[in-house]
Image: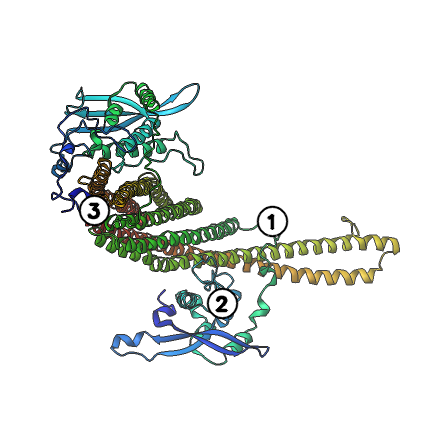
Amino acid sequence: MEDCLAKKMEITVSEAEKRTGRNAVNMQETYTAYLIETRAIESQSEGQCAPVDSLWRRYSEFELLRNYLSVTYPHIVVPPLPEKRADFVWHKLSADNMDPDFVERRRIGLENFLLRVASHPVLCQDKIFYSFLTQEGGWKEMVNETGFQLKADSRLKALNATFRVKNPDKRFTELKHYSDELQSVISHLLRVRARVADRLYGVYKVHGNYGRVFSEWSAIEKEMGDGLQSAGHHMDVYAASIDDILEEEEHYADQLKEYLFYAEALRAVCRKHELMQYDLEMAAQDLTSKKQQCEELATGTVRTFSLKGMTSKLFGQENPEQREAKIKVLEEQIQEGEEQLKSKNLEGRDFVKSAWADIERFKEQKNHDLKEALISYAVMQISMCKKGIQVWTNAKECFSKM
Amino acid sequence: MPHPLATSSSEEMGPALTPSPDLLLPRSIADKDLSLPNGTPVDTSSPASSSSLLNRLQLDDDLDGETRDLFVTVDDPKKHVCTMETYITYRVTTKTTRAEFDLPEYSVRRRYQDFDWLRNKLEESQPTHLIPPLPEKFVVKGVVDRFSEEFVETRRKALDKFLKRITDHPVLSFNEHFNVFLTAKDLNAYKKQGMALLSKMGESVKYVTGGYKLRSRPLEFAAIGEYLDTFSLKLGTIDRIAQRIIKEQLEYLVELREYGPVYSTWGGLEVELSEPLEGVSACIGNCCTALEELSEDMTEDFLPVLREYILYSESMKNVLKKRDQVQAEYEAKLEAVALKKEDRPKVPTDVEKCQDRVECFNADLKADMERWQNNKRQDFRQLLMGMADKNIQYYEKCLTAWESIIPLLQDKPETK
């Protein structure tokens, strides 16, 4: 971790700004741009403040960066971006992407993303990432020049396509299963949490009606009037307090969402392994069948049924020269195939090794982060309870003076 | 000089008015002169009978209980299953040093019907007083189980309150029917006897003075009427708000009940996070229990008392109307006399009696109103403080739950 960028450079996404521009088809569009500020850390110890560099990026550029990283480092659990569209909202929150609260939470999420990448021992060293942070113009072209889109395997995009893999690494199978379950349980949790927030909002707000009626009632009372009136005020305070409480809880939801999306990244690594294993097995199978073909041609025995074999029987055998030529081609292919198989095997083993190392790192990070999230959630609940006790104690005192 | 009785308006009350000698009662049991407009004899056996102005002015409410001599409790509900019907009886226990009671202690069983009968009797025999309300007879809302523990307990509390209010009343507590209610082993026999008497008298039981229309309600009673109107309106609003809160809380509870277990499911997937997640799940479960208790308490303790006071206001408005009737009758009769334009030395006795009735009614009503206002203030102070208390307790339970899992969440596996 001593080498990681996060230690050398301060990175913040400090502002968000609404912009209008023209898109690829020359139509006017509104989008939000985010200001990324960076500053070298080392010189601060000398008592000097290093200059701040800054540039603006929009969400789509972040997406491009992440796609590039996912394709270039398939064995890494790449940190996820904050959600594209507001999801799991409860009624008071807007699902509008331009809503200032959403934009603010997205700003925080984007900063978090950059910090995650900058603290990753492998990803932080990437040049494209560094340019993303420091080079305003021409970055997009630079990314496209890497040709990463060509490396991307379209098969990985089909989430549910199954490859019939005979011997996957059991750990990856289990891990994929775990990531599916994790996604499912966190989604469920977020959905119910949103409903819980909605209902809690309702409970608090209805209490505000007490404020009004106590005030009206106090008007016709003599000794009881003051107590009722001031108690009513506390009911108003109570009703208003829920807004801040739920606002804070959104941060907890965002922490959960990050790991919901992380589960997706985890799954992608497992899928990559499956794909590599599949290709390996296919290559091995192909090699075996070619070897068999070669043997059959050489010895003249047909062990397996093949249409070619049948047609040649029907329409006559090939002459010895043709057979020789075929055997030669096959032998070349077999040699190629064996080398490819060797390298694929090696690739596969390297992948498993490095992927598993990153997965272990990820597990520790996940356990740490989620524990912190649960603690902060408990702290939020404690604060809410204390506020509730305070308000009702105040109201009780007012009632006692009635 | 105008005759003092003829010119006295119901607004002027006080020691300046000298009641006629007939009205100052010794403790005579049979005084046929006094009867209510419908002919029902007025209870004159008590020292604080409703026609005794002087006595009333001297009488004070003992709120400190030092000179309390009558204690009544309602408890021990029991279900009775008979061929014709199933019903609940409550034990009514009386402890007293009053001479009006033969024994110092009584214990009888009464059902709702009996309380209802008592209330009707009190309304008939003490029409100038505010009679406390009973909990509603029929439960129409939803599918309420008349025999559920909660319903029976809520009713018991209301019936207990009803009898205690009567016990605390300086006039009502000496009522003959109340005495019988507390002491008779066979109340039904007494009830039948009462019905027989009435049918003999051939009078309608209801207190109706005949369609006299009051021109204008005196200011102080108009003020009371307006107060009661606004008061019951506001209570109605509070009742609706409280119901709405309970409804929202129960809907919140439904979601919480689904929320907690999801943490548990997640815990099942994890290794290191398993305990923390289970802890959060259990914590939410505890909050659910606390919330359930809060909603139950509000339903059983808060709402019924509100509704009781709404009923109270309604019956009080009726008493005000009766008072108006009595005054209207008096004014009409007085006018009739004045129209005769004869120089009479003495105002006819029945007009005098009407005036007495008006004055008595006004005095009783004012005294009761003041008593009611005080009790109302105490009752609502208690009720609202209780509501605040229940909410504080709910939050304290939740706070304890969350505070207790913080160490569990912070626990590092290496330290185990």
* Mark-to-mark CA distance, 2 and 1: 31 Å
Q: Which residue is at the front of the view, B356 or B375? A: B356
* Mark-to-mark CA distance, 1 and 3: 108 Å
Marks 1/3 in contact by CB < 8 Å: the verdict is no
Residue B312, given in percent of the width and then of the height, sits at 30, 40
Image quarter for residue A161?
bottom right
Give the residue number, with chain letter if any, for mark 2.
Answer: A66
Give the residue number, with chain letter if any, for mark 1.
Answer: A166
Judge from the rendering whether residue A387 lies leftward or rightward of residue A97; answer left or right. Answer: left
Q: Is residue B13 above or below residue B124?
A: below
Residue A276, given in percent of the width and then of the height, sits at 58, 58
Q: What residue occupies the far right of the structure in this picture?
A: A315
Q: Is residue B383 above or below residue A8?
A: above
Give the residue number, with chain letter if any, for mark 3.
Answer: B9
Q: Which residue is at the front of the view, B31 or A317? A: B31
Please say whether residue A131 is visible from this viewpoint: no
In the rendered view of the protein, which quadrant contains the N terminus of chain A?
bottom left
Which numbered disc flags the more N-terminal residue, 2 or 1?
2
Q: Quick one: SS at disc 3? A: loop
Q: Which mark is residue A27?
A: none
Same chain? Circles 2 and 1: yes
Q: Which residue is at the front of the view, B323 or A88? A: B323
Look at discs 2 and 3 and give the one toward the viewer.
3
Identify the chain of the residue marked 3, using the numbered disc in the image: B
Same chain? Circles 2 and 3: no
Please say whether residue B353 is visible from this viewpoint: yes
Look at discs 1 and 3 and give the one toward the viewer.
3
| Amino acid under disc 3 | Ser
Judge from the rendering whether residue B381 lies leftward or rightward of residue A157; answer left or right. Answer: left
* Mark-to-mark CA distance, 2 and 3: 93 Å
Identify the chain of the residue marked 1, using the numbered disc in the image: A
Q: Residues within 10 Å of mark 2 (few under 14, many from 20)?
A: some
